[in-house]
Amino acid sequence: MFGIIQPITSRLTLSNFDFHQWREVSLLHRLMSPFRAWRQGSWLLAWGDGIAWVFVALTIALAPYVTTAMIGWLLVAAAGFWILLTVSDRAEGWLTPLHIGVVAYLGAMVLATALSPVKMAALAGLVKLTLNVLLFMLMARILRVKELRSGLILVYLLTAVVVSVYGLRQWFFGAEALATWVDPESNMAGATRVYSYLKNPNLLAGYLMPAVSFGAMAMFVWPKWLPKLLALVMTVTSSACLILTLSRGGWLGFVVMGFLMMVLMVFWLSPKLPPVWQKLALPLLLGGSALVVLAAVLFVGPVRERVMSIFAMRGDSSNNFRLNVYAAVFEMIQARPITGIGPGNEAFNQVYPLYQRPNYTALSAYSIYFETLVEGGVVAFAAFLWMLGLSFQQGFAQLGRLRQLGAEDGLWLIGALGAIAGLLVQGAFDTVWYRPQISTLWWMLLAIVASFAVDYRRDVRSKRRALPPAEAMAEMKRS
């Protein structure tokens, strides 16, 4: 049975596909030769990756504070620079299975746009998605460099701690609710939900999730005690602010992220543990964490109220609102199940009123999974699931390799995978994933996973070149 499944999974994950050989016979690759010759004499492009890092770092650092339009222009600049670097590059080793998954997802949305009943609105959404995908391409390229990867994570963590401190200030001194974020008839009606610079507590929760995961990993990666202490402060501050958003989806994502990271940390540290602790570490850690979560639900009033509201169904105004939106969304999916209505909130806003329940206007499907089905149908949804599967498969595979090498950079991979899982759980009940403040982080997380895969493929090719032809061919068949 395993012998049958393994070839299928290898094909689905493109594990045995030699991207380097594909590049060598690519007509497009040959057409780019003049640009590569031009680059050899360019002083500016000799620093191309560093310049690209500045564009990306500015996007990450300014995202919580500037307008969506400004973020859009930064994305345009990053996309343009990626194109410039790519057409003039040797293009060696940058392509991974995850890149193919991302392109497949984008291709599905191109098809959805072409067949959309509201083509111009869908085209606007496709442009936004394309800019985000090109940002992923640029980040996956530059984050291959260890120092640039660590530097970008540091930029994000420093930005997130400023956002978190402002959020905590709102908790202590009060903040005006910019919308009805808590059921006015519940016991939590007077509670303060912090939103910091992002103007929305659910959005803030999603924004801070990677800050918690990377902050926790920084405590292990950063050398010396002062940086480790800074990482601890960042982690505690971001965690506290995330909890004080009172975002139920954010809390669920936070818990899932924490559990996954603990599992991966036990896997990472297990070779260094005594045999007894190799068996007991994971059950004790997960069991203790589960008890802490249970105690918080049972004995902390605000936590208990928010958790119980999840099961109130239509008894909670937020739940009732989502259920009415979901009912309309299901009808939208049934109307165009194969290719959907096209990507973007503008397409959704034009089609949703035809199906909405009275007095239940919505800007999105309030679930990234339903939103994907609405926008791109089952074609885009299948591509989306494939992309997610590739991200975890590639991440887990590279984590095992890095553990064997003893490379501490692998801990950033644990942070990325944990944050991806957390955002996917929160995204089941909200679509903050589509806001640029979070979408840029989402593609950064995928790019970090892809960057480690690029390192691996580059190392494999270097080893093959050093082998005699017969041994190199045998090595290719084994891999």
Image (cartoon, grey):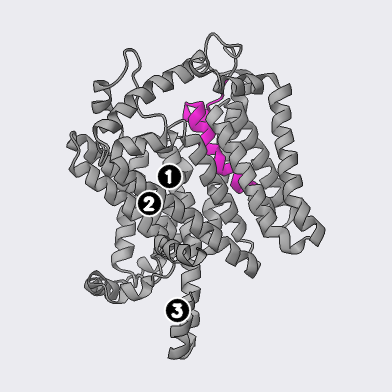
What SS does tag 2 mark? helix
Task: Say left or right for 302 vs 8.
Answer: right
Dot 3 corresponds to which residue? Answer: 476
Q: Is residue 226 magenta?
A: no
Above/below status of 314 relative to 330: above
Distance (Cα) linking label 3 and label 1: 36 Å
Q: Which residues are magenta?
A: 193-216
> Tag 1's secondary structure?
helix
- What amino acid is found at the position of numbered circle 2 in the picture? Leu
Q: Is residue 461 visible?
A: yes
CB atoms at circles 1 and 2 under 8 Å apart? yes
Nearer the observer: mark 3 or 1; the answer is 3
Q: Which residue is mark 2?
A: 135
Choose top left, top right, bottom left or bottom right for residue 321.
top left
Residue 201 lies within the magenta run: yes
Across and down, in percent, residue 78 comes to: 35, 52
Q: Residue at x 51, y 15 (%)?
A: 316
Which of discs 2 and 3 lies nearer the camera? The answer is 3
Task: Judge the density around disc 3: few (<14), some (14-19), many (≥20) Cα neighbours within 10 Å.
Answer: some
- Pointers 2 and 3 in contact (C-beta within 8 Å): no
Residue appearing at x 28%, y 48% in the figure: 108
Q: Which residue is mark 1?
A: 440
Q: Please name the amino acid that badge 1 sits on.
A: Thr
Q: Does residue 69 lie above or below 357 as drawn?
A: below
Q: Main secondary structure of the magenta part?
A: helix
Query: Which is nearer the eye, 58 or 13?
Result: 13
> How far apart, in angstroms, are the residues tagged by discs 2 and 3?
32 Å
Where disc 3 sits, the SS reads helix
Q: Pointer 1: residues within 10 angstroms few (<14), some, or many (20+)?
A: many
